Image: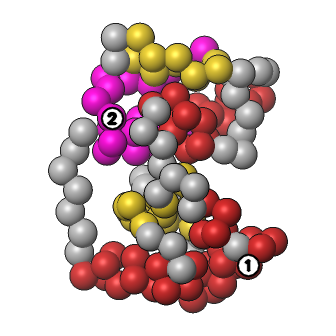
Amino acid sequence: MTRIKYDASLMKTMSVFETVTMTTLKDCFVDNNGLLIFVVNPTMISKAIGRNGQNVKKLERMLNRKIKIVEFNPSLTQFVRNLVYPLNVKDVEEEEGVVKIIGPDTRTKGLLIGKNSQNIKNYTQIVKRYFDIKDMKVV
C-alpha cells in the first residue's frame, strides 16, 4: 500500500465531486492513462453515478475530462471486479500476493491487458494503493 498525497487542484476536484453527487469520497486520482478516477465508499456507487449517469455526464462537462467512478470494497477480489467493470471476468483469485484475473475470452483478456500491457500495469498500481499485493496477471 502506498501513502496517498493530494495537491490543491485535486482537493478542489474532490470537493466538486462531493457537492454534485452528494456522496462521500474515499479517494481520487489520475491514472496513467489520464483518466480521473473517483473511489467512493461501499453502497454509494448508484448515488454517485446518478439516474441514467447524469452525475457522470455533469462532472465530465464541468471538469472537461473523462472520469470513472469505482466502488471501494474491503475484499480484494470484489474491488478488482469493481475496478475492471464493465469488463466481465470469470473469476478473480489471489495467491501469495499475486492477483489472477480469469477472463472469459481472448477479447476480454486483450482489453484487460491493453496495448503494451498498460491497462494491467495501471490496474496493479491502483490496487496497490489499498491492498498489499505483488503483481496482477490475466489468465
Q: Quadrant of the N terminus?
A: top left
- Element on which disc 1 rests: helix
Give the x, y percent position of residue 51: 77, 73
Q: Amino acid at mark 1?
A: Gln
- Residue 116 among those drawn in magenta: yes
Image quarter for residue 46? bottom right
Residue 80, compared with residue 35, is above or below; it is above
Q: Amino acid at mark 2?
A: Phe
- Residue 64 among those drawn in magenta: no
Q: Which residues are magenta?
A: 115-139
Give the x, y percent position of residue 70: 55, 54
Q: Residue at x 81, y 71 (%)?
A: 52
Q: Is residue 131 left or right of residue 111?
A: left
Would you name the residue on which mark 1 appears? 54
Q: Is residue 133 left or right of residue 101?
A: left
- Element on which disc 2 rests: loop
User: Which disc number belongs to residue 131?
Assistant: 2
Give the crowd class for mark 2: few <14, some 14-19, many >=20 residues within 10 Å: some
Q: Nearer the viewer, residue 7 or 93?
A: 93
- Gap between marks 1 and 2, in whole Å? 31 Å
Q: Is residue 1 left or right of residue 56?
A: left
Q: Quadrant of the C terminus?
A: top right
Give the crowd class for mark 1: few <14, some 14-19, many >=20 residues within 10 Å: few
Residue 23, compared with residue 38, is above or below; it is below
Q: Is residue 111 left or right of residue 133?
A: right
Residue 117 visible at all: no
Q: Which residue occupies the extreme top position in the image?
A: 95
Image quarter for residue 85? top right
Q: Nearer the viewer, residue 26 or 106?
A: 26
